[in-house]
DNA sequence: GCCGTTTTCGGCCCGACTGTTTTCAGTCG
């Protein structure tokens, strides 16, 4: 996704929200949102190609986008910004407060921000207003209070362990139980967790009594929502056994994917809901997702691809990619030991990797320029000797002595060529000077790619979800350099990094880049984070061929050191 | 606004929950 696409999509998204607030037609709102999402995810730069190539963009939106590309806004957006203060748009971020209520609050009471709303409630200015009873007002006041916290999404590592905890706590009472939603689609951040169960209604009482529950948000026979102590909301839904597949399909989403496949059902004269695929009263399919997709005449779509950005068309043409899977991985090319900032010894890490059945495994401790790690060339060479000895214990797993180099502000790395060439594999990463300008950062990455000994760019955006923003670089230029120089981009599986993100993976692949799915482990349990990296790769539609860490050893070695 | 094996007009996904509305509107996913 190019920068122009992101900005244009954000403007269109803002327009759709303002348009909804001003009572605009709901179908047009959806058209704008659909187009905004399609533009954001489009592989080509819309400032370089005709924006009409993007699916969902017709003449009217194309003209708006062209005007945006020229001057950074468009006439209709300016007009609505004039009418609706930004704070009113922020009002709709308050849970349970939608466009209808927001615009009423603004027009009738001059409330133009979440804080103005809580002041008005506290002052009693909204008492007795039609549609706003005492409970509603209390909920809104609390909603504003929690806005900051509620709007914060957690990374997939936090969400996955919470989901697994919830399922473990309820499994004894359920015939079937599983998580759905964006977690099942392996998004890198999760807003809330959907758990489905085939179970007696008493499971709701068990759920509400769990120690991880902070507050019960809603309670019914079919659905109970709680806010957990981590701040994440969990929805538990009890579904009929016979419609398990339909429920999993429906609640896995995404919304856009479901709209697309429902349209297919409607065209066949059928109806698809969370209870099944129906022709009138007759059930066509409901028990499994597989039979629903089959009945609709399409391939089964793996959850990570269900984003409504073209996968349905591919599935109808039997043209979905054969996605890379966890079982395809033959190794890990970015791991640490207690020689630098890892907490496990070389021997422990290697033994754990061997237990995973890897064909190769690289140890890549930090290099000297990250001074706090106190690495020296002597220490690195001593480690190499120990690795060569350890190799004899593991004849079926090739140990690679690597290093994680630091890409300096000018794109140079820690050691000169004569030292770099003695390593089996070199990962190079940005660990400092995060706030360079876009031009400097881009040149920095390009220089690193052009270093013939740099094999992999580690955690390219250097983001830490919720803590550190990604660095600013012209990724099109960086990826072109990576493709040209045969430098792989890392998909760092550590869940708070999830770096590269899947949108950038798609963009890099478009340029012909290969990827290394690595754990960046600093401890034995981290080795298993690879499932998150595989999730990112799947969301980007990668096949095993795209991922060098699925390749046989010989192919991998010739990629690293072409002679 | 978009779109087309219902094709240039007319449809665009659908059900659950909440609060207060005594029959439903708003919001969410």
Image: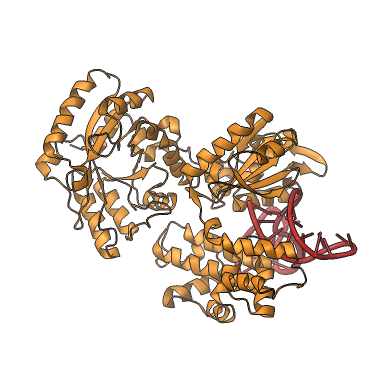
Q: Residue at image x 49%, y 65%?
A: A9
Residue A237 lies left or right of residue A75; in this view the side is: right
Residue A178 screen position, x and y as percent: 61, 36
Query: Could you tell me which quadrant the N terminus of chain A lies in?
Result: bottom left
Residue A182 lies left or right of residue A372; in this view the side is: right
Q: Nearer the viewer, residue A74 or A118?
A: A118
Residue A128 screen position, x and y as percent: 77, 72
A488 relative to A552, above or below: below
Query: Chain B takes which shade in the image?
Result: red
Residue A290 screen position, x and y as percent: 63, 35
Q: How is the image coloured?
A: by chain
Q: Residue at image x 67%, y 61%?
A: A139
Tell me if residue A166 can be seen: yes
Residue A295 screen position, x and y as percent: 68, 38
Query: Chain A takes which shade in the image?
Result: orange
**Number of dots carrying numbers:** 0
Residue A370 lies left or right of residue A325; in this view the side is: left
Tell me if residue A54 can be seen: no
Q: Quadrant of residue A196?
A: top right
In the rendered image, the residue lying farthest to the front is: A123
Q: Residue at image x 13%, y 45%?
A: A415
Residue A506 lies left or right of residue A382; in this view the side is: right
Query: Could you tell me which quadrant the C terminus of chain A lies in?
Result: top left
């Amino acid at each position: 996704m190019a920068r122009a696409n992101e900005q244009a999509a954000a403007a269109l998204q803002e327009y759709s929200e303002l348009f909804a607030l001003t009572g605009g037609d709901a179908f047009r709102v959806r058209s704008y949102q659909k187009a905004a999402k399609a533009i954001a995810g489009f592989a080509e730069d819309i400032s370089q190609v005709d924006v009409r190539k993007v699916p969902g963009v017709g003449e009217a939106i194309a003209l708006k986008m062209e005007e945006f590309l020229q001057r950074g806004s468009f006439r209709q957006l300016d007009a609505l910004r004039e009418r609706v203060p930004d704070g009113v748009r922020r009002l709709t971020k308050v849970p349970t407060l939608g466009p209808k209520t927001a615009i009423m609050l603004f027009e009738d009471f001059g409330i133009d921000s979440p804080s103005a709303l809580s002041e008005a409630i506290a002052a009693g200015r909204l008492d007795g207003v039609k549609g706003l009873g005492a409970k509603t007002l209390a909920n809104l006041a609390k909603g504003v209070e929690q806005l900051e916290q509620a709007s914060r999404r957690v990374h997939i590592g936090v969400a996955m362990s919470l989901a697994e905890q919830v399922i473990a706590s309820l499994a004894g009472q359920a015939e079937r139980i599983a998580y759905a939603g964006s977690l099942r689609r392996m998004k890198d951040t999760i807003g809330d967790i959907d758990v489905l169960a085939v179970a007696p209604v008493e499971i709701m009482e068990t759920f509400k009594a769990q120690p991880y529950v902070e507050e019960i948000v809603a309670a019914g026979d079919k659905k109970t929502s709680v806010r957990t102590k981590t701040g994440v909301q969990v929805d538990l839904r009890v579904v009929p056994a016979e419609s398990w597949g339909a429920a999993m399909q429906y609640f896995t989403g995404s919304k856009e994917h479901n709209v697309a496949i429902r349209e297919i059902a409607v065209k066949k004269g059928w109806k698809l809901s969370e209870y099944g695929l129906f022709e009138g009263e007759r059930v066509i399919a409901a028990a499994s997702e597989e039979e629903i997709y089959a009945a609709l005449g399409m391939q089964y779509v793996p959850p990570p691809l269900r984003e409504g950005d073209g996968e349905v068309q591919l599935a109808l043409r039997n043209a979905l990619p054969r996605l890379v899977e966890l079982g395809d991985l033959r190794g890990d090319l970015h791991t640490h030991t207690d020689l630098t900032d890892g907490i496990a010894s070389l021997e422990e890490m290697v033994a754990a990797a061997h237990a995973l059945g890897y064909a190769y495994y690289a140890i890549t401790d930090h290099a000297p320029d990250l001074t706090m790690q106190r690495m020296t060339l002597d220490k690195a060479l001593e480690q190499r000797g120990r690795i060569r000895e350890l190799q004899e214990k593991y004849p079926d797993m090739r140990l690679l002595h690597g290093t994680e180099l630091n890409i300096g502000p000018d794109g140079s790395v820690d050691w000169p060529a004569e030292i770099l060439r003695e390593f089996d594999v070199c990962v190079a990463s940005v660990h400092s000077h995060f706030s360079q300008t876009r031009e400097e950062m881009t040149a920095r990455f390009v220089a690193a790619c052009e270093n013939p000994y740099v094999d992999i760019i580690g955690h390219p955006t250097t983001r830490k979800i919720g803590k550190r923003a990604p660095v600013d670089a012209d990724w099109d230029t960086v990826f072109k350099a990576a493709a040209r120089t045969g430098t792989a981009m890392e998909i760092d599986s550590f869940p708070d990094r999830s770096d590269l993100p899947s949108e950038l993976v798609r963009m890099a692949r478009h340029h012909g880049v290969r990827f290394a799915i690595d754990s960046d482990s600093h401890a034995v349990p981290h080795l298993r984070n690879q499932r998150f990296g595989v999730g990112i790769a799947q969301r980007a539609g990668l096949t095993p061929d795209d991922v060098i860490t699925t390749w046989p050893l010989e192919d991998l070695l010739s990629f690293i050191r072409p002679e």
